Image (tube, rainbow, N blue to C red):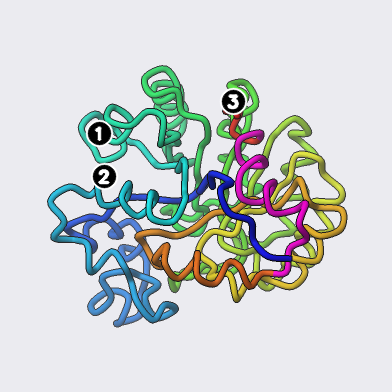
Amino acid sequence: MPMPSGIGIVDTMIGFAHRDLREVYRFITRQTKDRESRDEFEFPVEYMFKDVPEKDLVESADSVSTTLREMDRWGIERGLIGVGEPGDAGDLALKRHPDRFIPSVGADPNAGMDGIRKIVAAYETWGVRAVGVFPAGTFPQVAINDKKMYPIYAKCVELGIPIFCCAGVPGPRLKMSVQRVELIDEVMYDFPDLIFVTRHGCEPWQELAVKLMLKWPGLHYSTSAFAPKYYPKAIIDYANTRGADKIIYAGYFPMGLSLERIMTELPGVAFKDEVWPKFLRTNALRVLGVEQ
């Protein structure tokens, strides 16, 4: 089933190049212990990727324009980006191109109520449409079902926005137990109104992720950080059967994958004709609560 053109893709994980990669990822490397991660890698998971686009873009004078140029080149109409403070790249992108970018904010469960206030402030300032969390990257680590996470989930429900949460074995050389996919089950039980979108593959528990998506209406899966030729078969099969409304496109530009590689490989994914528009666009807009 060939990938159709002209859909107006919504990318639920896209960003901007940074000049100092080591500083950006210090929140990860401060808790890694192997020599490569701490002393050699600029990007903590570069061992997993042949090329890291961000390294080639760090000298770009305008990272927002660089990302927008790549979006235009590959038919990406809108991108979900992170925003943290006035004047950062996300803030500038939203001011310059509010029709092209959708704001999200990162959450730290170790920050307690200060973290919740940050979410509320981002919602009031930028109108964020999602919250992101990386359990293995928190310091100290906080599991998906840890009660420190519960105020974040509760606030997402209250604001009517989804949580995008990394699940499965993390790419950085961090402990994985906090991201075991089975932990999502307890969260969905306690927050039946929560829209929970997994990031970064759920491997090696992708079949369990499918089982849980069948069980919980609010649970979804995004394809972030995976080149399309490596999309898990269980996820493709689920999208083509009962899960057409649950699987959401996400890239990984400029962190680990170029849009050229993603979009060149994407037509080779065996989605049914009726799945493509949902996967590339409408599922994301519905989950994010953005008008089509």
Residue 114 sits in which quadrant?
top left
Q: Residues within 10 Å of mark 1 (few under 14, many from 20)?
A: some
Marks counted in the figure total: 3
Please name the amino acid that badge 2 sits on. Answer: Val
The quadrant holding residue 18 is: bottom left
Residue 256 is drawn in which quadrant?
bottom left
Please report the bounds of the magenta region as a residue range: 270-286
Residue 108, visible in the rendered structure: no
- First in residue order: circle 2 vs circle 3: 2
* Marks 1 and 2 in Cβ contact (< 8 Å): yes
Density class for disc 2 (Cα within 10 Å; few <14, some 14-19, many ≥20) is: some
Provide residue 149's location: percent of width, then percent of height: 58, 40
Q: Which residue is mark 1?
A: 92
Give the labeled residue for mark 2.
Answer: 64
Q: Quick check: can you spot residue 156?
A: yes
The Cα atoms of the two marked residues, 1 and 3, are separated by 22 Å
| Disc 2/disc 3 C-alpha distance (Å) | 23 Å
The residue under the point 68% across, 65% down is: 2
